[in-house]
Image (tube, rainbow, N blue to C red):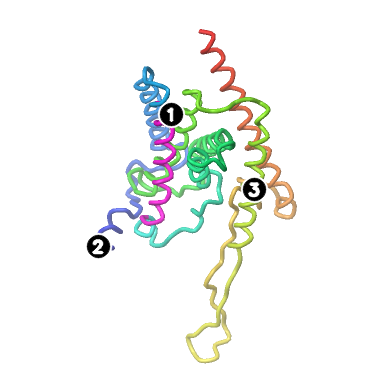
C-alpha cells in the first residue's frame, strides 16, 4: 500500500509542465485561481447573504482540511513529515486561526485580521513561490500548494466581496495584536526547533567520529532572517522581525483601505 501511494504522490520531474516561479505552469495556475474566484463570485451574485457567508466559512474550512490532510499524505510524497509545515508561518497558521475566529467567541474579534493576514500571505507566496522546489505541475506537492494557497486567497476575496468583515479603522489594533502574536509564536518555534544534534558514530567500538542526526535552522515568519536572505547575518536578526511585522501590517492596512473604497463605491451605486 505504501509503495503504491508513494508512486502516486511522489514528485514527478519529467520536465513536463514544470512548476517554478514565473514559469508557464505558475502563470497558468494563477490564472486558474483568478478565473475560479471570478466564476464563483458570478454564480453567487444573487445568493442570500447567509449563503454567501456559508461559502466563506466553507472555503476557509476546506483550506484547513487540506492543511491537516497534508501531514498524512506528505510522507508518501516526500518520504517523511516535513516539520517546516508546522503552523508557525503566516500561511500555515492562518487557516487554523481563521476557522477559530469564525467558530469561537474567544477569537471572533480577530476574524477580519486573520482573514486579511491569510489573504496577504497566500497572495505573496503564490505570486513569488520561491520556497517551492520545482516539480511537474501535476505532482501532489505542487497541487497541494496551489490549492491550499488558492483557497486562502479565495476566502479573503469572498469575505471582502460579501461584506463579511469589519473594516472600521478603530479595529486595526487587532491586526497589530495578531501580527505581533504570530511573530512571537514564530520566534518561539524557531528557537525550539533550530539546532544541531550529534551522536557518537557506532561503526566500530570507541569510534572518535560524530554523526549528525539533526541539523535544522528554521525561519518561520521570517523573524530570524529576511525572506530573501539579502541582509548580512550579523544585523539581519535585528532587522528581520521589524521588516516582517511592519510589512504584513502595511499590506493588511492597504487591503483594508482598498476594500473600504471599493465597498463604499458599490454601495453608492
Graded by Cα atoms within 10 Å as few (under 14), some (14 to 19) or many (20 or more), the crowding at tag 2 reads few
- Which residue matches tag 3? 183
Number of the front mark, 3 or 1: 1
Which residue is located at x 37 percent, y 28 percent?
36
Would you identify the image quadrant in which residue 72 lies? bottom left
- Secondary structure, mark 1, is helix
- Which residue matches tag 2? 1
Q: Which SS does the magenta portion mostly show?
A: helix
Graded by Cα atoms within 10 Å as few (under 14), some (14 to 19) or many (20 or more), the crowding at tag 3 reads many
Could you tell me which quadrant the N terminus lies in? bottom left
Against 94, is 210 above or below?
below
Who is closer to the viewer here, 257 or 12?
257
Graded by Cα atoms within 10 Å as few (under 14), some (14 to 19) or many (20 or more), the crowding at tag 1 reads some
Instruction: Classify residue 24 as left or right of residue 236.
Output: left
Who is closer to the viewer here, 149 or 44?
44
- Which residue matches tag 1? 53
Which residue is located at x 70 percent, y 54 percent?
233
Q: Tell me which numbered mark, 3 or 2, is placed earlier along the sequence.
A: 2
Against 74, is 215 above or below?
below
Against 200, is 144 above or below?
above
Please state the extent of the stretch shown in magenta in the rendering.
52-73
Instruction: Classify residue 119 as left or right of residue 174.
Output: left
Q: Is residue 63 magenta?
A: yes
Amino acid at each position: 500500500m505504501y509503495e503504491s501511494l508513494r508512486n502516486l504522490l511522489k514528485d514527478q520531474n519529467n520536465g513536463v509542465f514544470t512548476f517554478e516561479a514565473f514559469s508557464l505552469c505558475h502563470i497558468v495556475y494563477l490564472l486558474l485561481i483568478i478565473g475560479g474566484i471570478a466564476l464563483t463570485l458570478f454564480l453567487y451574485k444573487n445568493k442570500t447573504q447567509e449563503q454567501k457567508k456559508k461559502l466563506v466559512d466553507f472555503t476557509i474550512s476546506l483550506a484547513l482540511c487540506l492543511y491537516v490532510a497534508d501531514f498524512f499524505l506528505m510522507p508518501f510524497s516526500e518520504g517523511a513529515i516535513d516539520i517546516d509545515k508546522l503552523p508557525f508561518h503566516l500561511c500555515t497558521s492562518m487557516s487554523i486561526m481563521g476557522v477559530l475566529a469564525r467558530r469561537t467567541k474567544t477569537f471572533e474579534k480577530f476574524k477580519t485580521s486573520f482573514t486579511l493576514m491569510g489573504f496577504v500571505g497566500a497572495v505573496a507566496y503564490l505570486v513569488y513561490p520561491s520556497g517551492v522546489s520545482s516539480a511537474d505541475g501535476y505532482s501532489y506537492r505542487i497541487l497541494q500548494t496551489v490549492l491550499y494557497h488558492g483557497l486562502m486567497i479565495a476566502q479573503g476575496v469572498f469575505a471582502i466581496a460579501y461584506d463579511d468583515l469589519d473594516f472600521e479603522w478603530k479595529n486595526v489594533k487587532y491586526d497589530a495584536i495578531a501580527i505581533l502574536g504570530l511573530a512571537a509564536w514564530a520566534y518561539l518555534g524557531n528557537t525550539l526547533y533550530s539546532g544541531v544534534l550529534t551522536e557518537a558514530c557506532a561503526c566500530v567500538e570507541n569510534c572518535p567520529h560524530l554523526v549528525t542526526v539533526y541539523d535544522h535552522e528554521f525561519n518561520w515568519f521570517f523573524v530570524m532572517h529576511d525572506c530573501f536572505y539579502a541582509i548580512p547575518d550579523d544585523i539581519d536578526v535585528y532587522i528581520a522581525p521589524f521588516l516582517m511585522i511592519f510589512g504584513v501590517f502595511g499590506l493588511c492596512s492597504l487591503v483594508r483601505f482598498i476594500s473600504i473604497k471599493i465597498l463604499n463605491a458599490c454601495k453608492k451605486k
